[in-house]
Amino acid sequence: MANSERRIVDSFWDLRDDAYDNPDRWQGVTAEALFQRLAEYVENAEERGEPIDWRGVAERLIAWRASEHGA
């Protein structure tokens, strides 16, 4: 359990670091939009019966924002 918790924490730090390094990418993002996207990724993994890859979730969220800004 501690290892899973560490991955979750690391993933949130990755998101925070990306928001700090690329503030324009995250401008206008609401907590609702971020958590909606997060919930979709987690739900999709659960529906496929896959373990939740928290590092992958953070990477997908960062890619989502980058694609919205043409980065």
Image: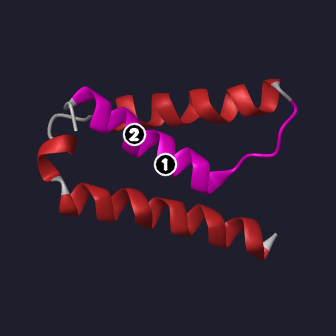
Q: What is the magenta range?
A: 49-68
Crowding near pointer 2: few (<14 within 10 Å), some, many (20+)? few
Residue 61 shown left or right of residue 65 in the figure: right
The answer to which quarter of the image holds residue 3 is: bottom right
The answer to whether mark 2 and mark 1 are in CB contact below 8 A is: yes
Q: Is residue 22 magenta?
A: no
Return the mark for residue 59. 1
Measured along the vertical axis of the image, is residue 24 above or below residue 15?
A: above
Tell me residue 58's x, y (percent): 50, 50
In the picture of the structure, the residue carrying the numbered disc 2 is: 63
- Between the C-alphas of marks 2 and 1, the distance is 6 Å
Residue found 82% across the figure and 69% down from its top: 1
Residue 18 shown left or right of residue 25 in the figure: right
Magenta: main secondary structure: helix
Measured along the vertical axis of the image, is residue 38 above or below residue 44?
A: below
Return the mark for residue 23. none
Q: The C terminus lies in which quarter of the figure?
A: top left
The answer to which quarter of the image holds residue 25 is: top left
Tell me residue 35's x, y (percent): 46, 36
SS under mark 1:
helix
Tell me residue 27's x, y (percent): 15, 40
Q: Work out whether residue 11 or residue 31 is closer to the camera in this orientation and state it.
A: 11
Question: Label 1 is placed on what type of residue?
Answer: Glu
SS under mark 2:
helix
Measured along the vertical axis of the image, is residue 44 above or below residue 24?
A: above
Q: Is residue 67 magenta?
A: yes
Crowding near pointer 1: few (<14 within 10 Å), some, many (20+)? some
Q: Which of the colour schemes (rainbow, by chain, secondary structure, one colour) is used?
A: secondary structure
Q: Work out whether residue 71 or residue 46 is closer to the camera in this orientation and state it.
A: 71
The answer to which quarter of the image holds residue 21 is: bottom left
Question: Label 2 is placed on what type of residue?
Answer: Ala
